[in-house]
Amino acid sequence: MPLPRPHPGLVICYEFLWSHEHEAGMTQGEKRRPCVIILAVQDRLGDTIVTVAPVTHVKPRDPRHGVEIPRRLKDYLGLDQAKSWVIATDLNEFIWPGDYVFPIPGGRLDQYDYGTVPQSMLTMINRCIDQLGESDLHRVPRDADR
């Protein structure tokens, strides 16, 4: 199975680089995790620029900074049973497919996505991002040489 076409709502296995890691000079994330594609646009060079938001078990301190994933959706995506949130304050941007997209753990070696979140969930995530102030939103560009 080839890499899927990136589109908003697709949940991929991605080596996410948190903004605090980036600010400390790190260039690779500490682990691979599910991430939701929130934006996929083609640039003037014909490359697809993808923006992802991470999924984590750590509840955001401020409830406005993340969206909890309902149990049923976690089951559908094949994620574990622990509570999880999509974090809206930290985003990674990269050229698809980049160097940080990986096959999902426990899946086939050629399966890179968990599935797609429903439009209602994607709308909640985007609304959360849109309501953040510039000081609360951290975008980490993974293709710095561009």
Image (tube, rainbow, N blue to C red):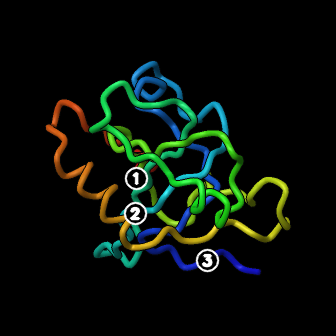
C-alpha gap between disc 1 and disc 2: 20 Å
Where residue 45 sits in the image (x, y, percent)?
A: 35, 75
Image point 49% across, 46% down: which residue? Answer: 54
Q: Residue furthest top?
A: 24
Circle 2 is placed at which residue position?
121
Front position among marks 1 and 2? 2
Where residue 56 sits in the image (x, y, percent)?
A: 55, 39
Circle 1 is placed at which residue position?
93
Q: Which quadrant of the view contains residue 98?
A: bottom right
Mark 1 surroundings within 10 Å by alpha-carbon count, few (fewer than 14), some (14 through 19), many (20 or more): many
| Res 142 label | none
- Quadrant of the image containing the N terminus: bottom right
Where residue 146 sits in the image (x, y, percent)?
A: 38, 53
C-alpha gap between disc 3 and disc 2: 20 Å
Q: Earlier in the sequence, mark 1 or mark 2?
A: 1
Q: Is 91 placed above or below 27 here?
A: below
Where residue 104 sits in the image (x, y, percent)?
A: 74, 58
The one nearer the camera, 12 or 83, is 83
**Tag 2: residue type?**
Met
Q: Is residue 57 left or right of residue 111?
A: left
Image point 44% across, 29% down: which residue? Answer: 22
Mark 3 surroundings within 10 Å by alpha-carbon count, few (fewer than 14), some (14 through 19), many (20 or more): few
**Tag 1: residue type?**
Glu
Image point 79% across, 71% down: which residue? Answer: 110
| Res 4 label | 3
Front position among marks 3 and 1? 3
